[in-house]
Amino acid sequence: MSTGESTVGSAGFVRVASLGELEEDTPKRVEVEGVPVSLVRTGGEVFAINDICSHANVSLSEGEVEDCHIECWLHGSSFDLRTGKPDGPPATRPVPVYPVKIEGDGPDAAVLVSTTQES
């Protein structure tokens, strides 16, 4: 499946990739209903975080991943993939994180993301 291709799944989740398309600790930019999202497979889990740095308005998917954090390539702000909170300056505002579902097994398992806020 290409980066721009997605299909709507159950309960507001959108299929954006297969598990086999995600390399360990390598962010992949996708769009979920017009929202830029960085998908990251690390430590046996898949995370979805808004792809735009809250400090410099650049793509986080171009940064590096380490210890469940993604670092912005421009000024070095690092964000927790679980919470979106920055670890320190220059970023002071968190970026949104989104729920992820994996449907199926193996490399063909579907990765689904929802950008709808849960109540």
Image (tube, rainbow, N blue to C red):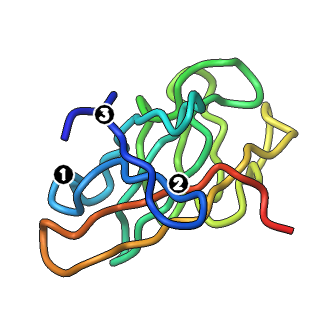
Q: Are marks 1 and 3 in contact (CB under 8 Å)?
A: no
Q: Amino acid at mark 2?
A: Ala
Q: Does 7 sit left or right of 83 as displayed?
A: left
> Which quarter of the image is occupied by the C terminus?
bottom right
Q: Neighbour class for label 2 at 10 Å: few (<14), some, many (≥20)?
A: many
Q: CA distance from mark 1 to mark 2?
A: 14 Å
Q: Amino acid at mark 3?
A: Glu
Q: Which residue is mark 1?
A: 21
Disc marking residue 13:
none
- Establish if 24 lies above or below 54: below
Answer with mark 1 or mark 3, whichever residue precedes in sequence.
3
Circle 1 or circle 3, nearest the eye:
3
Residue at image coords 44%, 50%:
8
Disc marking residue 5:
3
Residue 62: x and y, percent?
Answer: 41, 29
Q: CA distance from mark 1 to mark 3?
A: 13 Å
Residue at image coords 75%, 49%:
86
Q: Does 12 sit left or right of 84 as displayed?
A: left
Q: Which residue is mark 2?
A: 48
Q: Are marks 1 and 2 in contact (CB under 8 Å)?
A: no
Q: Are marks 2 and 3 in contact (CB under 8 Å)?
A: no
Q: Nearer the viewer, residue 24 or 91?
A: 24
